[in-house]
Image: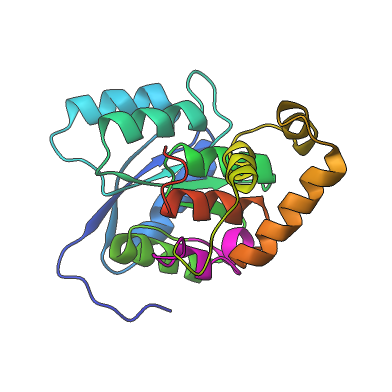
Amino acid sequence: MPTTKFTKEHTIAIVDDHLLFAGSLEKLIDSFDGFKVLYHVKNGVELQQKIKSNSQLPDIVLLDINMPVMDGFETVEWLTENQPSIMVLALSMDDDERTILKMLRRGAKGYLLKDIHPDNLQEALHEVMEKGYYHSEKVANTLLHSLQPGLLNNELVLKENEITFLQLACSEMTYKEIAGIMNLSPKTIDGYRQDLFQKLSVKNRVGLVIYALKNNIISI
């Protein structure tokens, strides 16, 4: 449980079309020391309207993904472009790797599952305010090494094909599609993937994306 005491209340906006869940989440967050929910809305369009009509911006947006009118992917893109000071934490039932990758690439600072323990949610809110990101055990337990700066140096040199593969792996393409674009066999692509997992000390595709972002191999 975080012990840090804040001198100000950090503000939260909840974007989720399940009103019962959003209402319960608001009560929970309001019980956390140092945090207060400004409002909750049902989709990205309503969030845009709230942001434009309210003088106070939320510090954090807790963002669902599957919503009508304007979903989480479109919403985080809009926030990244128009309100980059607002930190987005995705909060979803969807633990699919591609979904996580899409949200991180579009600017989310973390990805949480809706069955998260309240203590872990409180920890995530504290950490995103203190560090600017939060990566849960589900997303990145083994990625702390890749989050450190300076990994792309003289001790770690990536070959041209490895960099190309890394850039393509940060897209939503399947490994089979990447093999086709690079004119290589799927077996060779599997080799690149395993070699990079070992070189970069990561265990999954999310790790590749975070490494590439931190070392400016790709940009959001």
In front: 99, or 122?
A: 99
Q: Nearer the viewer, residue 98 or 91?
A: 98
Q: Could you tell me which quadrant the N terminus lies in?
A: bottom left
Quarter where residue 183 is shown: top right
The quadrant holding residue 117 is bottom right
The percent position of residue 36, horizontal first and vertical second, equals 28, 55
Residue 1 visible within the image: yes
138 relative to 76 in the view: left or right: right
Task: Say which residue appears at 85% left-offset and 37% top-offset.
Answer: 185
Against 44, residue 62 (above or below) is below
Which residues, given as a range, are shown in magenta?
135-152
Q: Is residue 88 magenta?
A: no
Q: Nearer the viewer, residue 103 or 54?
A: 103
Q: Tell me which residue sits at (79%, 52%) in the image.
A: 191
Across and down, in percent, residue 216 comes to 41, 47
Q: Whole-percent x and y of residue 10?
A: 24, 57
Left or right of 180, for residue 214: left
